[in-house]
Image (cartoon, rainbow, N blue to C red):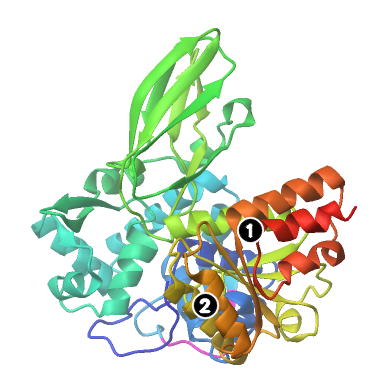
């Protein structure tokens, strides 16, 4: 979600900017260790909130307070959530029993708990904006995915507020799903799930086991139809119950036993999804009268999938990789052997840092944009003390070599930069693994080459030995 702070709203107690389920979970984790002020939370999670201003941290805390997952304490007294107390200050935030309960759940069940708490917010009228959104869906069957248009139809909710509700809360909790009408995307409210979530015993689900300890089935890209299978070494009658969270997202294609193996075949439909989605359990299955949790599926945007793949590859080179991936930040920071634990000190110190930029867009213009962002990353927001950018793409544009030569000759960018394909990165890992040469000093001539890495550069490095 986009970063930002206070703004005017025609609704009381408006949602803040910068919301997303992953970010809220991070805030809960730091509060689970110690009660903290807004500024202290901002500093603990500096890599996510960044900059000098703490409005995004404040916004996250207020939403967790609204959800009942944290308490606000002033002079050791709990201040109750209310409209009159909305603008609280000069106190500390403490995790509540509900917040602790969420952290204690299996990862695949956390989105259900968030959905339950969103339903409570509506029931208790703790958000005039949410009330207006749901009441509008009761009248209209669908609303545009476009946040500006959706906000107008929901009584004038501002653009950023609408983005947070739709993409930060309602879609990643399964309360919204997408449909297409005349080739335009719309949101539909999942009222069937909204009613069911109030009755689900999440604690009982949490007590269930994953069969054969298979708790996640991998990362899948939203926006395209994909089939996948879950296979177990069991022989028996299986009854599958999909969570209504996945309405219009996943279909059961086949359940069969073959050679004493249970094979469940499912289909992920070609539906886009919010970046705030977190891994979520597909449902439950009953085998020989015993109920198990089905594993979680991690559905991500195409860009996120590419980033996760590249980060995983870089870690195979024994590099410390710190993912960030926000609109005004690099995708990750790479350090050969990070020593400083404190995030803020690490960003400012002299340890070698390479800024990672990954994208599925393989145009020259996008590469230029990523390289230009170095100034923003090092002089604004996080102010990272870095010296180089690593650009990784699946495919490079045809004219890359000539253009990069011109950029280097004219010093077009203030930093050194390296450009490499995913295929060549995989080849580098393969050569490092076979030669047992996984040492940054030995491969730095590849990862710190000024310009485009070619396959022959890697071949030449390893042919020397």
- The answer to whether residue 456 is above or below residue 385 is above
Tell me: 165 left or right of 367: left
Say if residue 40 shows up in the picture: yes
Residue 13 in the image, given as x and y percentages of width and height:
33, 80
The residue under label 1 is: 311
Magenta span includes 89: yes
Tell me: 133 left or right of 381: left
Residue 216 in the image, given as x and y percentages of width and height:
56, 39
The residue under label 2 is: 403
Tell me: 455 left or right of 130: right
Residue 343 in the image, given as x and y percentages of width and height:
71, 77
Badge 1: how crowded within 10 Å, few (<14), some, or many (20+)?
many
Magenta span includes 6: no
Q: Main secondary structure of the magenta part?
A: loop
Give SS at disc 1: helix
User: Which quadrant of the rendered structure holds the N terminus?
Assistant: bottom left
Q: Furthest residue to the front? A: 402
Mark 2 touching mark 1, by CB under 8 A? no
The residue at 58%/87% (across/down) is 413
The quarter of the picture where residue 352 lies is: bottom right
- The answer to whether residue 401 is above or below residue 311 is below
The residue at 24%/71% (across/down) is 147
Q: Furthest residue to the right? A: 465
The foreground one among 363 and 87 is: 363
Residue 261 in the image, given as x and y percentages of width and height:
54, 13
Mark toward the start of the polypeptide (2 vs 1): 1
Task: Provide the residue span drawn in magenta.
Answer: 87-93
The quarter of the picture where residue 40 lies is: bottom right
């Amino acid at each position: 979600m986009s970063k930002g702070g206070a703004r005017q709203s025609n609704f009381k107690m408006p949602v803040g900017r910068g919301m997303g389920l992953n970010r809220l979970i991070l805030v809960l984790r730091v509060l689970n260790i110690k009660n903290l002020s807004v500024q202290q939370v901002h500093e603990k999670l500096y890599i996510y909130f960044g900059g000098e201003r703490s409005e995004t941290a404040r916004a996250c805390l207020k939403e967790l307070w609204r959800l009942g997952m944290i308490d606000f304490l002033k002079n050791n007294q709990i201040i109750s959530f209310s409209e009159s107390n909305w603008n609280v200050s000069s106190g500390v935030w403490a995790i509540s029993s509900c917040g602790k309960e969420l952290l204690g759940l299996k990862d695949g069940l956390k989105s259900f708990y968030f959905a339950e708490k969103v339903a409570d917010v509506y029931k208790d009228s703790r958000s005039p904006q949410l009330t207006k959104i749901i009441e509008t869906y009761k009248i209209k069957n669908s609303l545009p995915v476009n946040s500006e248009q959706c906000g107008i139809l929901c009584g004038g909710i501002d653009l950023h507020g609408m983005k947070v509700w739709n993409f930060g809360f309602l879609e990643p909790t399964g309360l919204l799903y997408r449909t297409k009408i005349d080739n335009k995307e719309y949101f539909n409210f999942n009222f069937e799930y909204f009613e069911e979530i109030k009755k689900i015993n999440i604690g009982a689900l949490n007590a269930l086991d994953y069969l054969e300890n298979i708790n996640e089935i991998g990362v899948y890209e939203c926006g395209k139809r994909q089939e996948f299978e879950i296979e177990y070494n069991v022989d028996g009658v299986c009854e599958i119950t999909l969570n209504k969270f996945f309405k219009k997202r996943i279909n059961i294609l086949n359940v069969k036993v073959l050679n004493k193996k249970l094979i469940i075949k499912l289909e992920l439909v070609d539906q886009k999804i919010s970046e705030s989605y977190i891994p979520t359990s597909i449902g439950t299955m009953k085998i020989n009268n015993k109920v198990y949790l089905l594993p979680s599926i991690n559905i991500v945007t195409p860009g996120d999938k590419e980033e996760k793949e590249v980060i995983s590859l870089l870690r195979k080179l024994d590099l410390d990789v710190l993912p960030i991936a926000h609109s005004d930040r690099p995708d990750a920071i790479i350090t050969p052997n990070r020593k400083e634990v404190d995030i803020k000190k690490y960003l400012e110190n002299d340890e070698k840092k390479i800024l990672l930029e990954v994208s599925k867009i393989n145009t020259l213009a996008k590469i230029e944009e990523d390289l230009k962002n170095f100034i923003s990353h090092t002089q604004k927001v996080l102010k990272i003390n870095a010296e180089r950018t690593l650009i990784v793409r699946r495919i490079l544009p045809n004219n890359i070599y000539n253009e990069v030569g011109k950029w280097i000759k004219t010093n077009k960018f203030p930093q050194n930069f390296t450009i490499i394909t995913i295929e060549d990165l995989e080849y580098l890992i393969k050569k490092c693994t076979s030669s047992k040469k996984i040492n940054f000093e030995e491969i730095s001539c590849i990862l710190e080459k000024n310009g485009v890495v070619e396959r022959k550069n890697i071949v030449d490095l390893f042919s020397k030995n």
